[in-house]
Image: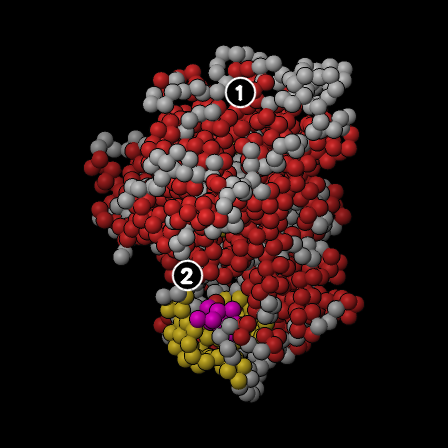
């Protein structure tokens, strides 16, 4: 890049916790961003990416402080500045776009006032008219209206996408030199997300702003960032130009991360990373990644590797990067094709179902068939009604009209009203493993609950079956006496699946079961599900918003939008040759790593 | 609004190796704070005096001491002097705590049990029943506890069972509010959904899934109610609606001996200090548990 | 009806309903429990004839519902019945005590409401400082103490035993307003203030801390707004709702506390009147005072709820 002073330069940044042994949350963070560039800061949970984002503004959350390092904005180090000076810089020289705008905009202040405040407190313009003009300009840039009526609104009167765009406008209002965006598209639907990303890219180019884009979503980062820094365990694992980093990763973690991301093309098998990311204070000695690393050698446990230069603007923190690069040429394992199902009688039939939440109708005349031993993917964005449909089938949502039949017999709307066999044979796995296990019970008790209830099995027989179920989902039997909080997210989700399995279901309804998990862990869950489906010959209804995931698992797919099924068919057919407009738009708006890499090399 | 006002939570490091049973962890974390230890110490002291006192009192609490006038100052025979009827202050003090403890304890127990039942039912039904139950609780809340007890006492007179009933009934809505507030959050969680999906009966769900998860705020609320009810019960005794003379009762003692405060303050000071210590003790325990509970939740939330 | 007006009306109706049901309970408790007023008044040696005569006079021989209706319609028209103790109209009997109690409450409120709010807010702002930690311990201890314990301790300290600066009981003359007895008012007011402030200060602190740690306050700081503005324009407007709740709680607490405090200091307010009337089994007065206190509670809660709605734009706009 240019040799002029970078807009943002972070050197050897270390953020520690206030209490205990003063462990670090992040350490040794060094990177630079030039004007007009976007640096992607990628990491999973526990990587410290949000901490770094905040530190760029010289801010830390309660309970932490900046212990060492420099953050130079246009050459000036902001960390040693007195609080008053730093306050003047924020919002003017360096801006922040928060992850959740709903909670970041003041609930009791109209948005026009909040925008005006961002300008007036930093001394912009000499009159109300000046500021009003800038507000109009900035709202226009994010494609929001700027009439009086709109400005008079309170934050809760805007949609999620609008709130996010207001936050963007506020951040760009003073034409800062550096802007930090913390996963600003979380919770937005795909189309809005695509738009917001486009807007960010344009604004950065237009105003020559250096942007730091914090995210866990590699696909998004790949479409937006010129350079990427990969974080693991509070350290920089690797940093380099986007295309190079993803195609020729030098760090084992980066490599495995790329392989763990599901692709729309479905060419390669999803490979996860065993284990979980360590939290501050629980990081292993030497290299943090070594416990999960296929390249780990003895040296990795004794010494922590330093950042080394590998190529043009490409640095990596690993002793064995040469080997990783060499292996990069090796082909990735190809995806295992999903087995074909021959048409049989239906397992579940949904006919003419209209469902509602209170007054609001969320499903409109939905019709669907799930065949035995088949995996049907139910795809849609939030608000499409896919979860509601899944819940109706499982008996968790009872305000609907229409018929849902299981094995030819109509089911009652609520689970309580159904007979024991139906309740036993249709099992449901919830989205959040942090919510679906009773924190006061041990895993053994949780998984064993259906046994007592359906089969009246107790004692040693029950224990044996629980162990069997745990083994099926590849959970160690030491989990029996552990509590949910002692397990990681991925392990908890597997326990939830074990609980469903132990009831010996014929249909397993999985509601976004990987959405709450890190990407590297997600593959393991998909693996478990795929294997289970093959071995046990059960039907699977797989609900997800991630189109790329379905190829690894399902034979058929139904695409939903606004409470209706807009397209249905075999997975290959729908993904390769979509018929419905909505499906086409969804496919084109979904950020894809492969597409981004392909575009950058063209 | 009977919510517990929260002081800052305790910093709890909950790592993967933390395998203690939840209530053990709560008690251990609570105990690790100074305030809890002090609270337990004070409470045990006063409870000890109240329970053992009657057995070690030097004189009969309702009989005068030989050769001593009313309101005599402390002497070698009467360590804290005599009261308004010439009885040994120390003996009456030792005998006077049991009634407060039992009355406050019984009414708190009744109120908590009823309140939890109502709160759980309201939280789980999430509909009409919820509204009806909580509006009824609101009605009971529109009178201060003491006023309600007084109103009841106006008809029947100062009967002890009435006192326990009145205080218990007015404890119920406060406990119900707190229970409902905590239970409503738990009822929304997926593990309760999961139990419903397999068809577990409502009672099993409330007992097995919901109740264990609201145990912490319930324990805290119980200590808070106990603190308040000691005050209410002692207050009613002070006003003359608790135990009747010549029984020994701390509240009653304070009232009986007010006239002699200028010459012989001990029959008032001793019970006042004892009641004060008891309420402070239970309050400290409640606060310690509350901070521990929230600290544990925060520690878990960091996962 | 929809919108804000609809909500206000519904909330008012709910308040009226609550009060109505409470009145039923008050009436039921005093009339429907075993042992009736006539027997209590005449004593055990009463002859059946005199009992029957008195019951007729008191209207106790009529069905309960009729009795209730007589009473409640009287209340609504200003006729609270006649005191059994001295045959005067209840409204005369409670007139002056109401003035005495209100004066005491207002004095206590004027001190305790701002004090509680200020202590709580400042503690939250200076979290973990020496001030905060001392206040926290002090409020925890004081909040636990029963009011009469506080009252008696103050009496011992300042009136009878340690110092003798102030009167232990309030000796007042009927017909003279309470403002003529400043020395008699000091200890009761301080007792009430000590009884109420610690609890409300703790709640205020907790609410304020929650707001100061919220995302939008952090965001306001990240926007580079001066701390002054963050506090006053972002934090405080969102702290108003809890402040109203705390104030209502404060005042309701005071209304409950006066019963015992007035008894301790022999202060001629409605609290003391209630206690005396209960002892004398003077039902009409008991019913009237209890209803009065309940009405005060209901009104305070109503005002707090309405103020909360008005002050939260989110709630306000979701209704209209």
Give the quadrant of residue A505: bottom right
Answer above or below: position of B278 versus A463.
above
Q: Count the marks: how many?
A: 2
**Disc ID at residue A190:** 2
Q: Which residues are magenta?
A: A388-399
Q: Is residue B129 visible from the viewing direction of this image? A: yes
> As drawn, is B156 to the left or to the right of C314?
right
Asked whether B130 or A482 is in front, the reply is: B130
Instruction: Locate residue C109, reporting x and y percent.
Output: 40, 28
Separation (CA) of disc 1 from disc 2: 68 Å
Q: Nearer the observer, disc 1 or disc 2?
A: 1
Asked whether B160 or A577 is in front, the reply is: B160
Q: Which chain hosts label 2?
A: A
Asked whether A277 or A408 is in front, the reply is: A408
Instruction: Locate residue C118, reporting x and y percent.
Output: 43, 27
> As drawn, is B200 to the left or to the right of A6?
right
Please give the name of the residue rendered at 66% of the width and 73% of the height, measured from the top-left corner.
A454
Q: Is residue C234 visible from the viewing direction of this image? A: no
Instruction: Locate residue C45, reporting x and y percent.
Output: 53, 42
Asked whether B247 or A122 is in front, the reply is: B247
Mark 1, residue position? C154
Quarter of the rendering occupied by the N terminus of chain A: top left
Q: Residues within 10 Å of mark 1 (few under 14, many from 20)?
A: many
Instruction: Locate residue A43, reporting x and y percent.
Output: 55, 50
């Amino acid at each position: 890049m240019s040799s002029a002073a970078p807009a943002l330069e972070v050197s050897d940044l270390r953020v520690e916790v206030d209490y205990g042994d003063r462990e670090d949350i992040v350490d040794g963070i060094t990177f630079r961003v030039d004007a007009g560039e976007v640096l992607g800061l990628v990491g999973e949970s526990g990587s410290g990416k949000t901490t770094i984002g905040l530190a760029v503004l010289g801010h830390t959350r309660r309970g932490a402080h900046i212990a060492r390092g420099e953050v130079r904005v246009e050459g000036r180090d902001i960390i040693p500045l007195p609080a008053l000076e730093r306050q003047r810089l924020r919002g003017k020289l360096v801006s922040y776009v928060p992850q959740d705008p709903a909670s970041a905009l003041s609930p009791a202040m109209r948005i026009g006032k909040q925008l005006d405040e961002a300008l007036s407190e930093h001394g912009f313009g000499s009159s109300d008219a000046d500021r009003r003009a800038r507000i109009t300009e900035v709202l226009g840039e994010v494609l929001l209206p700027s009439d009086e009526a709109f400005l008079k609104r309170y934050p809760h009167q805007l949609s999620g996408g609008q709130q996010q765009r207001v936050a963007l406008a506020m951040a760009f209002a003073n034409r800062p030199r550096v802007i930090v965006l913390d996963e600003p598209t979380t919770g937005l639907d795909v189309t809005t997300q695509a738009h917001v990303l486009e807007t960010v890219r344009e604004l950065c180019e237009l105003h020559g702003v250096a942007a730091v884009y914090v995210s866990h979503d590699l696909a998004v980062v790949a479409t937006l960032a010129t350079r990427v820094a990969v974080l693991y365990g509070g350290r920089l694992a690797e940093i380099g130009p986007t295309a190079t980093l993803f195609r020729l990763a030098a760090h084992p973690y980066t490599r495995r991360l790329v392989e763990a991301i599901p692709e729309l093309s479905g060419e390669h098998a999803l490979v996860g990373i065993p284990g979980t990311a360590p939290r501050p204070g629980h990081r292993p000695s030497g290299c943090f990644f070594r416990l999960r690393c296929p390249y780990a050698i003895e040296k990795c446990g004794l010494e922590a590797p330093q950042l080394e230069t590998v190529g043009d603007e490409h640095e990596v923190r690993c002793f064995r990067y040469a080997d990783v690069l060499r292996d990069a040429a090796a082909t990735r394992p190809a995806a295992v094709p999903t087995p074909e199902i021959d048409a049989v009688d239906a397992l579940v039939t949904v006919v003419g179902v209209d469902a509602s939440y209170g007054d609001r109708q969320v499903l409109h005349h939905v019709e669907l068939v799930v065949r035995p031993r088949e995996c049907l993917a139910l795809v849609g964005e939030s608000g499409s009604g896919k979860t509601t449909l899944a819940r109706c089938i499982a008996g968790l949502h009872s305000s609907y009209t229409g018929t849902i039949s299981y094995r030819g017999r109509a089911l009652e709307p609520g689970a309580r009203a159904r007979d024991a066999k139906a309740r036993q044979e249709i099992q449901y796995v919830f989205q959040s493993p942090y919510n679906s296990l009773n924190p006061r019970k041990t895993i053994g008790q949780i998984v064993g609950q259906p046994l007592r209830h359906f089969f009246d099995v107790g004692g040693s027989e029950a224990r044996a079956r629980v162990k069997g179920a745990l083994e099926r989902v590849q959970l160690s039997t030491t989990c029996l006496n552990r509590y949910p909080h002692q397990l990681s997210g991925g392990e908890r989700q597997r326990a939830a699946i074990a609980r469903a399995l132990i009831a010996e279901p014929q249909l397993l309804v999985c509601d976004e079961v990987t959405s709450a998990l890190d990407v590297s862990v997600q593959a393991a869950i998909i693996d478990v599900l795929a294997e289970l489906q093959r071995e046990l010959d059960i039907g699977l209804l797989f609900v997800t918003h991630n189109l790329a995931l379905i190829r690894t698992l399902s034979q058929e797919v139904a695409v939903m939008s606004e409470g209706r099924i807009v397209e249905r068919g075999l997975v290959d057919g729908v993904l390769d040759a979509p018929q419905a407009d909505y499906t086409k738009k969804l496919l084109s708006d979904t950020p894809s790593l492969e597409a981004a890499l392909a575009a950058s090399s063209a | 609004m009977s919510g517990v006002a929260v002081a800052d939570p305790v910093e709890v490091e909950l790592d993967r190796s933390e395998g203690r049973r939840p209530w053990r962890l709560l008690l251990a974390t609570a105990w690790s704070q100074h305030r809890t230890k002090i609270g337990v110490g004070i409470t045990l002291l006063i409870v000890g005096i109240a329970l053992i006192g009657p057995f070690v009192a030097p004189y009969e609490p309702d009989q005068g001491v030989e050769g001593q006038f009313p309101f005599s100052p402390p002497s070698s025979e009467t360590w804290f002097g005599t009261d308004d009827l010439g009885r040994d202050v120390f003996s009456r003090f030792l005998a006077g705590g049991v009634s407060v403890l039992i009355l406050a304890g019984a009414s708190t127990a009744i109120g908590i049990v009823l309140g939890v039942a109502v709160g759980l039912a309201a939280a789980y039904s999430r509909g009409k029943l919820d509204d009806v139950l909580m509006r009824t609780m609101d009605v009971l809340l529109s009178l201060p506890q003491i006023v309600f007890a007084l109103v009841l006492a106006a008809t029947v007179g100062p009967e002890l069972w009435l006192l326990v009933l009145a205080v218990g009934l007015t404890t119920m809505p406060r406990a119900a509010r707190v229970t409902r507030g905590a239970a409503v959050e738990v009822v929304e969680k997926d593990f309760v959904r999961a139990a419903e999906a397999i068809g577990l009966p409502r009672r099993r769900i409330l007992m097995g899934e919901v109740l264990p998860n609201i145990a912490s705020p319930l324990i805290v609320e119980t200590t808070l109610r106990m603190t308040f009810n000691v005050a209410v019960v002692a207050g009613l005794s002070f006003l003359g609606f608790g135990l009747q003379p010549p029984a020994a009762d701390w509240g009653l003692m304070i009232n009986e001996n007010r006239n002699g405060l200028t010459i012989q303050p001990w029959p008032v000071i001793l019970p006042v200090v004892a009641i004060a210590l008891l309420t402070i003790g239970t309050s400290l325990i409640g606060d310690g548990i509350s901070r521990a509970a929230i600290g544990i939740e925060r520690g878990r939330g960091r996962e | 009806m929809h919108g804000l007006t609809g909500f206000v009306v519904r909330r008012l109706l709910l308040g009226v309903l609550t009060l109505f049901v409470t009145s039923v309970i008050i009436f039921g408790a005093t009339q429907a429990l075993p042992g009736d007023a006539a027997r209590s008044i005449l004593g055990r040696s009463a002859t059946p004839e005199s009992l029957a005569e008195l019951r007729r006079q008191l209207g106790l021989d009529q069905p309960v519902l009729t009795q209730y209706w007589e009473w409640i319609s009287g209340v609504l028209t200003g006729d609270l019945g006649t005191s059994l103790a001295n045959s005067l109209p209840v409204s005369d009997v409670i007139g002056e005590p109401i003035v005495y109690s209100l004066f005491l409450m207002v004095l206590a409120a004027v001190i305790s409401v701002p004090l509680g709010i200020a202590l709580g807010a400042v503690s939250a702002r200076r979290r973990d400082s020496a001030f905060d930690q001392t206040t926290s311990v002090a409020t925890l201890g004081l909040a636990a103490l029963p009011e009469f314990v506080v009252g008696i301790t103050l009496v011992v300290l300042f009136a009878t035993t340690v110092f003798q600066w102030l009167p232990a009981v309030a000796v007042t003359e009927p017909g003279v307003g309470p403002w003529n007895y400043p020395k008699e008012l000091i200890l009761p007011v301080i007792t009430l203030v000590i009884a109420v402030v610690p609890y409300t200060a703790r709640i205020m602190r907790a609410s304020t801390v929650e707001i100061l740690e919220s995302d939008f306050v952090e965001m306001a700081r990240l926007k580079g707004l001066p701390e002054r503005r963050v506090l006053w324009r972002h934090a405080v407007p969102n702290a108003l709702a809890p402040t109203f709740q705390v104030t209502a709680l404060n005042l309701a607490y005071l209304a409950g506390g006066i019963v015992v405090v007035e008894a301790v200091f022999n202060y001629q307010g409605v609290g003391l009147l209630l206690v005396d009337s209960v002892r004398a089994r003077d039902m009409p007065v008991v019913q009237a005072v209890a209803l009065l206190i309940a009405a005060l509670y209901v009104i305070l809660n109503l005002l707090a709820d309405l103020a909360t709605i008005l002050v939260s734009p989110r709630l306000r706009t979701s209704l209209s």
